[in-house]
Image (cartoon, rainbow, N blue to C red):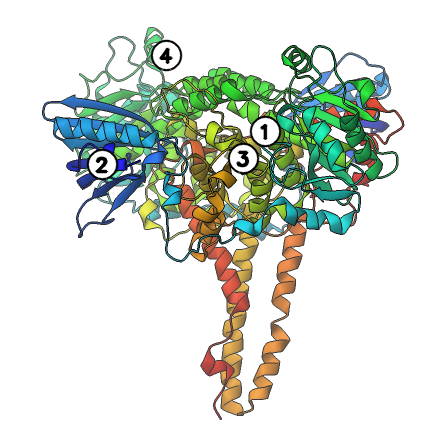
Amino acid sequence: MEFSELIRTGQAQAELLRGPEMPPLRGTLCVTGHHLLLSPGPQATPDLWLLLLRSVDSIEKRVAGDAGTITLRCKDLRVLQLDIEGVEATLDIARSIEALSSLESVITSFPFFYRPKGLRLGESWHFHPPERYYKRVARETRAWRLSEANEDFSLCPSYPRAVIVPRAVDDDALARSAHFRQGGRFPVLSYYHAPSGTVLLRSSQPLTGPQKRRCAEDEELLQAVLAGARPGSRGFIVDTRSAQAAKQARMTGGGTEAKSAYPGWKRLHRPLERGRPLQESFVHLVEACGDLEQSMDRWLSRLDGCRWLSHVKEALSTACLAAQGMEWEGACILVHGAEGTDSTLLVTSLAQLILDPLSRTMAGFQELIEREWIQAGHPFQLRCAHSAFSHTRPKHEAPIFLLFLDCVWQLGRQFPLSLEFGEGMLLALFDHSYASSFGTFLCNSEKERCLCEVRTRTHSLWSGLNQPKEQRKLRNPLYAPNPLAIWPSVEPQSLQLWQGLFLRWTHPPEPSEVAWEKVWQIATDQEKTEGSQPTDSASEPQP
Amino acid sequence: MEHIRTTKVEQVKLLDRFSTSNKSLTGTLYLTATHLLFIDSHQKETWILHHHIALVEKLALTTSGCPLVIQCKNFRIVHFIVPRERDCHDIYNSLLQLSKQAKYEDLYAFSYNPKQNDSERLRGWQLVDLAEEYKRMGLPNSNWQLSDANRDYKICETYPRELYVPRIASKPIIVGSSKFRSKGRFPVLSYYHQNKEAAICRCSQPLSGFSARCLEDEHLLQAISKANPANRYMYVMDTRPRLNAMANRAAGKGYENEDNYSNIRFQFVGIENIHVMRSSLQKLLEVSGTKGLSVSDFYSGLESAGWLRHIKAVTDAAIFLARAIMVENASVLVHCSDGWDRTSQVCSLGSLLLDPYYRTIRGFMIHEHIHSCQFGNFIGNCQKEREELKLKEKTYSLWPFLLHDQKKYFNPLYSSTSQKLAVLEPNTVSFNFKFWRNMYHQFDRTLHPRQSVFNIIMNMNEQNKQLQKDVKDLESQIKQHKNKQTDGVLTKELLNSVRPESPALKTSLCLKEQTLLPVKDALRTVEGSSPADNRYSEYADEFSKAEPAVVSSEYGVARMTC
């Protein structure tokens, strides 16, 4: 396909307004296959302004007289306004942006063309898959093995090639268990908690259906999990749907584990919001945050009405419940909802951040996201196709990953010294999950990524983020390794709106940025002074 | 002491305020002449000053005992269960008596003895020198002078003796104006902006009714506007809602008629009165104190309490005031009804925005003194009352104690050199106002962040200073050695002897803050952070229910806290 077919005009003169705090830019506007460019001329700073077309969420055009205005609402929640000379040029540019920003083909997307200086293709892709995590588990226990039963993605199209399963269960049993689980997502190990010898598992719902079918191999698998843990261990199944919703799912072939079929396991229901209601919650919150004139009462009522912070609270509470079950009750935990690709991952990844100090390091957090979100088959392409501004009716969109990032941000607020990464890292992950020059968040599963050759033909976000020049933005200058579990308060008074994200563009961030800079300065001053050597002349006196 | 019947009750339970499963600590309750003291089984002490108690309630008898709920003025709420109803009744009655503020002389401040001698005590009281503060503002000058009109509190009992007024305002004008103002509170200077030559003045409402006028009052306002060479127009800010001010006219009070005063611009601000504010705060505390509060109830409660709306209104008024001075060079006269509540809020916040000095610790003390003590109250309601109470001989000043502990109050990110922010202009868009958890839940440990950024930055700052000093010391020592002898080995030894101290210093400070405990004890965690402290732990009851044989989380709590 040629992008040029979609580009209707070469260039136009335009003025760009980027919000109340930024000066407008005037210059030549130009649409390319992947970008919108504005060149204010060589003497201006910046001399080139660039927007990835993929990051445009919605576009609005208006013409009056012989000029037009295009309003671009971006997936990172920015709102941009372009005042363009010429009605035809305005309409052409608007149509070009519309067509190019909604292209669905993965292999023609920008990451397949992005070749930044200083990075080599294929670098750091191999950093984080499950094999690496298995090595960690194998050091602690012999009860688990790495299975390559899914090598050709035939058991489960949304799992990676290799998964960690109980040693006592062979690949044939896995295959049967996979048949019994929606989308083939049989129970696999998500996290091994060494201090208690317990494990966190995840799967999708069992396909019990109205006849209450059973699957011996699936039951054996969960039995083997308990047998592999400390003697007398119990298990809890944290179902992220309400008991009623789980029951109703039987009518459509799904369901939940019957008590009698899984001795030693007890089911707990913790309904978490998902799908369209969650997307609407996000949309309503962003709408409320865009209104600078509203009264205090209106703002509070909208903040309440969108229910976003309730979702944050429920997600954190459920993750704490799972973590607590492991650390305090010595129980094994299986988490699933329906598909097991959304709220399930939210709970398992948050529980690990709470329990596991390694996942709170920069490298560990990247590994966690790679393992528990990307490789675990969270359908990023479907969920993040549109952000909060899209006019199209949401189909598969849901800000589950954003909800995860928000929960991590809350953890960071309550334990400001315990995360090696700062708010900047969470913002970057949000931006890149919706639109990116890197290939990391492309596609919906490992299988699709293999088909598109994402690993060999695009750059990894991790190698982009791990460049030294990015560190000041991403790291927490106050980090001090904390070997303990971090139990957050989930009281409403303790949870806060993530202003750095939801008000990033509407609200001048200046004071907090000044403070952040100052914190960096203090923290780096300290390193400098502590590590400093006296000046040459002083340390090596001349005779 | 005649109020105390029982001085000690054992086996009293202190309930966790937010736990829905009646988690509690058991200990002994002591009643002294000044304090209620609870010592729990871990020897942790909870002291409650009788005069901090706002409300004591005895709830209906339960199977475990008689509940006694005490609400304090500093937002502490404690919930005791006293095993025997008689003891509870005795303590309840004693506290009812002891917490009553009968006479000033009964206040703890009059019996508190911090072991200062008289000269230290005097110096403490002299820390805040108002004459000095007026001098700092550049007063007196050609337009403003000290007036002795109120030297004997003859014109206005609630004003201090020393007041600044326009030089051209004669005593008869002041006296005349004071008769036209509620409680005699005529317009006086509150803050003078030296660069802009503009003043913030304050007063109470005029007794204008529907048509009354007072030439002296009109003259005094004109004198204030003439004292500002840059702008002859002055603002008169009535901080009340328009309706309230209009209602006051029926009672012979009211607000300035623009037609009668030359060169004024009259403006209502719409801050609610103390009765509205009081019930708003009560509602807020009710909401935030609810057990098992949902996010939705919290925000709808926050909205209906209206507290943040009031905070925004006061802030908006202060910004209006600061802009009038900075942008228009205009003087501003602020009043409400009596001119001692809303007026104080607006004048003090306004001058805090304008003057970086009030944003230092010492400056803030003076600021508080001018606005809370001189005109309002800490003890006593005005200077006259405080003199009659002989506070300076009988009690101690708070300021030296705050200054002594000033490290606790420092903001480590404060930068005195950021001239760019010389005048603060906060953005009052609604989402900038947030529930102040650290104030209203200051005693509810479990709701707070578990690690303090401020403390760690403070420590880093100090270490940085210390390390830089070390480096300088070493360099100068090396230089000295260089002069004396030329042996390089000695220099290196010297370096080694000092350097290892720094990392140790760092670790110890970090440990102190985070209370990091040995890793091997998996049940321990960052202090104040355990699942047992938080509400999701109540779900853990389900774990216990599943198999009665397993360890309950309550057992875990006991292990953790021992």
Q: Is residue A49 above or below residue A213?
A: below
Report which residue position mark 4 lands on: B244
Image-based side of A112 in relation to B555, left or right = left
| Label 1 vs 2, first from the N-terminus | 2
Residue drawn at (43%, 22%) of the image: A283
At label 4, which amino acid type do we have?
A: Asn
Chain letter behind tag 2: A
Measuring from the top left, give residue A180's x and y in whole percent. Answer: 70, 23
Q: Is residue B502 above or below residue B224?
A: below
Report which residue position mark 2 lands on: A16
| Label 1 vs 3, first from the N-terminus | 1
Chain letter behind tag 4: B
Report which residue position mark 1 lands on: A341
Residue drawn at (67%, 13%) of the image: A250
| Label 3 vs 2, first from the N-terminus | 2
Q: Work out how far the residue at label 3 is from the one at label 2, CA to CA, in angstroms.
A: 38 Å
